[in-house]
Image (cartoon, grey):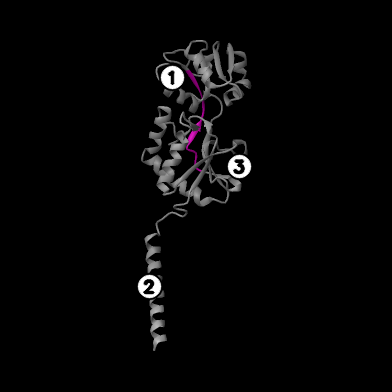
Amino acid sequence: MKWQKLLSLGLAAIMTAAVAAGCGSEANKDVAPGAGKKIVVGLDDNFPPMGFKDESNNIVGFDIDLAKEASKRLGREVEFKAIDWSSKEAELKSGRVDILWNGLDITEKRKENMLFSDPYMDNRQIIFVKKGTKDIKDEASMAGKVVGTQSASSAEEYMDGSAFFKEKVKEVKKYSDFVSAFMDLENGRIDAVVGDEIVGRYYMSKHPDSLEAVDVAIGDVSTFGIGFAKDNQQLRDDVQKVLNEMKADGTMGKISEKWFGKDITKK
């Protein structure tokens, strides 16, 4: 009879474990796949204000704040990993990073190698002028003016190929970086700067009394998205879901206002 008692106890233990497992499954049925697993975000950590190192060597920025909030809502830890941006697709494909989130333009060529979130911000080239300027309102009104931009930028590429900037603008002055161009604008050495809206508005947020933006796009407009490996549809969908929530409840707009002084995210 002893073996029968042991058998009964064993069956009871198995039944108890099965019930417990069933209860556990029921309790966790709403947990997102991958919950608790770390998300590794790859970025160029020298791209203010999207992602860069502050004076304390901490990685900060607009995209950093978005990624932190999205990860928190997913119940997952996030790690920011500086990578060679020219090798970003290889980093993603190899699994060394899970996401590329750093002012990444959505292009048809990149779509061949990665999945993208919906666009969350336009990447425009716009005009910046000294505060109080009245006579520059669009591209045509820069005729006869001295206009600055950054060398090797999208704005330079556009102006180099534009008959208007070659023939009508007095001079296109090129700088090693936009900060130098904005400083000359503040000091009255040039009449306008054409450059990345995100960079210019970030600079404006630090110098609110000296510059203003002419809210007109110059040249083509691209859009920013978040990149995922081709085989990581689940993570892409999970992140997109919380991004949609952040747009709807105003969180994304508030983060934009913090970094740019204005909500410039896509509605």
Residue at x 42% of width, y 86% of height:
3
Q: Is residue 180 above or below residue 55?
A: above
- Which circle's residue, 2 or 1, is located before the other in the chain? 2
Instruction: Confirm or deny contact between disc 2 and disc 1 (CB under 8 A).
Output: no
Q: Position of residue 203 (x, y in %)?
A: 46, 23
Quarter of the image with the C terminus is top left
**Residue 137 visible in the snapshot:** no
Q: Secondary structure at mark 2?
A: helix
Q: Residues within 10 Å of mark 3 (few under 14, many from 20)?
A: some
Amino acid beneath label 3:
Glu
Q: In which quadrant of the rendered image does the N terminus lie? A: bottom left
Measure the alpha-carbon separation of dots 3 and 1. 36 Å
Question: Is 147 in front, or is 209?
Answer: 209
Magenta stretch in the rendered image: 117-128
Q: CA distance from mark 2 to mark 1?
A: 69 Å
Distance CA(mark 3)–CA(mark 2): 49 Å
Provide the residue designation for mark 1. 212
Q: Nearer the viewer, mark 3 or mark 2?
A: 2
Going by the image, does 31 lie left or right of 183?
left
Where residue 174 appears, x then y in whole percent? 59, 17
| Camera sees residue 244 | yes
Q: Which residue is mark 3?
A: 89
- 124 in magenta: yes
The image's mark for residue 122 is: none
Q: Is residue 173 magenta?
A: no
Q: Which residue is mark 2?
A: 16
Q: Is residue 137 above or below residue 251?
A: above
What amino acid type is highlighted by mark number 1? Glu
In the rendered image of this protein, does residue 260 appear above or below residue 71?
A: above
The residue positioned 40% from the left and 27% from the top of the image is 261
Name which of mark 3 and mark 2 comes first in the sequence. 2
